Amino acid sequence: MARGPHQAHVAVKMKLRKGDTVEVRSGKERGERGTIMRVLPKANKVIVEGVNVVKRHQRQTQARIKGGIIDKDMPMSASAVSIICKKDGPTRIGHDFRADGTKIRVCKKCGGEL
Ligand SMILES: [Zn+2]
């Protein structure tokens, strides 16, 4: 079977999007909620505001007059977070179509649009 060049890099289809509110489902920050700031589809990771924060000590340089500690939100596995449904809380994402054919993301529990 012939393979086109467009098939060379098949990224995992990310269901999560920037701006989604998610809850951490595993790890030491389980139960924490935050908003997705960035989606990294190739790595299947997301950066969630205020979650998985690492304190970075910064050295004083000429460019940076004040040294000190800054908070950095680190990428985390997309499979470790769940999207929040307003009705059900953490849920899984399904797909559905509107009457006009637009593909939408829905809650797998209640079917409501996410
Ligand atoms: Zn729901």
Image (cartoon, helix red, strand yellow):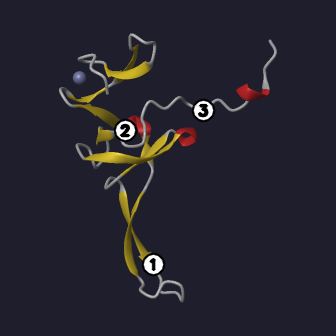
- Check the image and name the residue furthest to the right: 2
Q: CA distance from mark 3 to mark 2?
A: 18 Å
Q: Going from the N terminus, do you reach mark 2 or mark 1 first? A: 1
- Amino acid tagged 1: Gln
Q: Are marks 3 and 2 in contact (CB under 8 Å)?
A: no
Rendered-image quadrant of the C terminus: top left
Q: Amino acid at mark 3?
A: Ala
Q: Which residue is mark 3?
A: 11
Describe the element under mark 2 as helix, strand or loop. Answer: helix
Q: Which residue is mark 1?
A: 58
Label located before the other in sequence (3 or 2): 3
Vertical relation: 48 (above or below) 92? below
Furthest residue in direction left, as rendered:
87
Residue 106 percent coordinates (x, y)? 33, 21
Mark 2 CB within 8 Å of ligand 1: no
Residue at x 43%, y 55% (from the top left corner): 74
Q: Position of residue 15 (x, y in %)?
A: 44, 30
Q: Is residue 4 left or right of residue 110?
A: right
Query: Residue at label 2?
Result: 80
Quadrant holding the N terminus:
top right
Residue 89 image position (x, y, % from top left): 20, 31
